[in-house]
Image: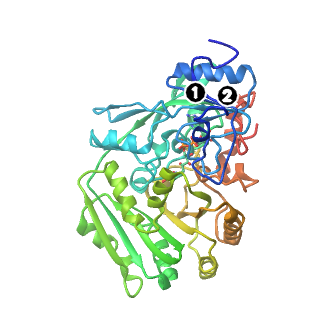
């Protein structure tokens, strides 16, 4: 191993023709200029890259899927250790266990699992990386039935003492394993591989309900009193969107049959007059195509996941997102606030996305995993804006900031680390709540030199 460089590893530097693409952020609002991007294809490569940065005390970050909202897997004047090319997956079909390298995307994982009639609760966007989503929690459209991604985590291969990989599990370094169940990516170590207990894929139906835009208040009211409490086989998102036209709709996935779904959605459908239109799409097994179809059901002209996929492929979307958790149903004056912002949107597209909690997510204790946002959580709200032109940055960002501020009287005060927001100065408390002190102790124990740091890392 060469102490002076990451010799032999594919490394891209500012003068290389591939630099612009290799250093681009998925969020084109953010532009960072790393001094080197080192691509690893094995644990041995990661060891070599880490030896290089640690022995030279070079600032660095780890990158897997590259979807950090605030570009925390990029760095100015430092090294990006990239694991995106480590993406192999092996499945023990009998034990229903998947071993997944950090660079695998959710699409690759779900497609591989589908071959074995298996599934894993994880995100609704196919291009997200398994490493980042797992280390922060992992919410998706089967979560009310099967929990978060971390609830299925069995073990992780992690860099220890900055110098060797070991399997960390509830039996070996249980404290560090616990920190990997929601303590956030980039805080403690490098993960090279995850092992998950998968679930059986079940027949599923994706659905969509569309209200007319003047029914927004009624739709929110009906959804918030229904979605967190309905049969846990049903997970749904409510979307309030604007891009020229105002839209209010619900997309969801039900792990069961059509007639049962119709009866479960009856209360929601009948709450507003005239009732919303219902679109159903049946699937034989829960596989990657379902994730895709759910996206399509929600996409149409301005849908949330469709837009993500579209713009992430083109790499053109500037965005600013943030989020809150809700423990008490939103009162009428909160809906007035939402209505006000909805009617004074920024340029581009604005979305409020409500993710239903309850069911298996809340059944796990708030300190059982490092993901603390359980207990009485009804849903999370993600405030999002997407736009194309740099000149609109200030207006779009200001709109999100003003909306989040106006919502504070109605929310619990915690925020999902995977929907990170650089504006949060009290980010540790918001991301980790009552689990923060324990996470700090673990950080001190396993990263005593605080090598793993970025603008919103856990402080020692
Ligand atoms: C379009 C889109 C859709 C999304 N949908 C969902 C969703 O449905 N549900 C949900 O829960 N979340 C969702 N997210 C949020 C997503 O979970 C986070 O952005 C997540 O951190 C992305 O992981 P990544 O590996 O792709 O990103 P990266 O940017 O590579 O990493 C994110 C963070 O983890 C660190 N990290 C990366 N790899 C490693 C590693 N191997 N070891 C240690 N630290 C590492 C990075 O340094 C960075 O701090 C979505 C995000 C986007 C952009």
- The spot of residue 92 in percent (x, y) is 32, 30
> Crowding near pointer 1: few (<14 within 10 Å), some, many (20+)?
few
Secondary structure at badge 2 equals helix
In the image, taking residue 111 as reference, residue 316 lies left or right, namely right
Foreground residue, 282 or 41? Answer: 41
Place residue 411 in its image quadrant: bottom right
Per the model, the C-alpha gap separating discs 2 and 1 is: 10 Å
Q: Residue furthest top?
A: 1
- The spot of residue 344 in percent (x, y) is 64, 78
Foreground residue, 299 or 100? Answer: 299
Q: Tell which quarter ligand 1 is in.
A: top right
Place residue 111 in its image quadrant: top left
Residue drawn at x 34%, y 66% is 207
Foreground residue, 67 or 153? Answer: 67
Residue drawn at x 47%, y 83% is 215
Residue drawn at x 65%, y 71% is 410
In the image, taking residue 421 as reference, residue 312 lies left or right, namely left
The answer to whether any part of residue 233 appears in the image is no
Q: Is residue 160 above or below residue 277?
A: above
The answer to whether any part of residue 83 appears in the image is yes
Residue contact between numbered discs 2 and 1, judged by CB atoms under 8 Å: yes
Q: Quadrant of the N terminus?
A: top right
Q: Is residue 357 above or below residue 223?
A: above
Disc marking residue 446: 2
Q: Label 1, on which residue? A: 173
Q: Earlier in the sequence, mark 2 or mark 1?
A: 1
């Amino acid at each position: 191993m060469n102490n002076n460089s990451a010799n032999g590893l594919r490394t891209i530097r500012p003068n290389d023709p591939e630099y612009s693409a290799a250093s681009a952020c998925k969020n084109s609002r953010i532009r960072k200029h790393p001094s080197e991007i080192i691509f690893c294809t094995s644990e041995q490569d990661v060891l070599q890259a880490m030896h290089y940065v640690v022995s030279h005390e070079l600032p660095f970050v780890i990158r897997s899927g590259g979807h950090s909202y605030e570009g925390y897997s990029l760095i100015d004047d430092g090294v990006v250790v990239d694991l995106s090319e480590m993406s192999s997956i092996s499945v023990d079909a009998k034990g229903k266990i998947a071993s997944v390298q950090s660079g695998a995307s959710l699409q690759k994982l779900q497609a591989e699992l589908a071959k074995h009639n298996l599934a894993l609760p994880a995100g609704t966007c196919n291009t997200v990386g398994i490493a980042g989503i797992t280390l922060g929690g992992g919410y998706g459209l089967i979560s009310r039935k099967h929990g978060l991604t971390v609830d299925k985590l069995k073990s992780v291969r992690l860099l220890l003492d900055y110098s060797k990989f070991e399997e960390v599990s509830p039996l070996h370094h249980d404290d560090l394993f616990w920190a990997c169940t929601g303590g956030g990516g980039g805080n403690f170590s490098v993960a090279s591989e995850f092992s998950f207990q998968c679930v059986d894929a079940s027949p599923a139906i994706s659905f969509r309900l569309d209200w007319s835009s003047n029914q927004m208040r009624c739709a929110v009211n009906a959804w918030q009193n229904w979605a967190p409490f309905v049969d846990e086989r049903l997970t749904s998102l409510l979307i309030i969107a604007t891009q020229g036209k105002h839209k209010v709709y619900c997309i969801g996935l039900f792990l069961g049959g059509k007639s049962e779904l119709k009866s479960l959605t009856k209360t929601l459908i009948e709450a507003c007059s005239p009732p919303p239109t219902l679109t159903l799409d049946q699937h034989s097994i829960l596989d990657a195509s379902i994730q895709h179809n759910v996206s399509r059901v929600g996409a149409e002209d301005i849908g949330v996941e469709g837009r993500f996929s579209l713009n992430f492929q083109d790499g053109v979307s500037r965005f600013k997102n943030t989020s809150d958790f809700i423990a008490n149903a939103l009162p009428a004056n909160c809906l007035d606030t939402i209505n006000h912002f909805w009617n004074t949107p920024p340029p581009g597209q604005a979305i409020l996305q409500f993710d239903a909690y309850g069911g298996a997510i809340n059944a796990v204790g708030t300190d059982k995993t490092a993901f603390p946002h359980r207990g009485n959580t009804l849903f999370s709200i993600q405030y999002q804006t997407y736009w194309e032109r740099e000149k609109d940055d200030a207006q779009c960002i200001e709109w999100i900031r003003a909306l989040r501020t106006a919502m504070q009287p109605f929310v619990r005060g915690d925020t999902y680390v995977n929907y990170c927001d650089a504006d949060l100065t009290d980010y540790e408390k918001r991301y980790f709540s009552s689990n923060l002190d324990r996470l700090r102790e673990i950080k001190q124990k396993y990263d005593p030199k605080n090598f793993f740091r970025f603008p919103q890392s856990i402080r020692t």
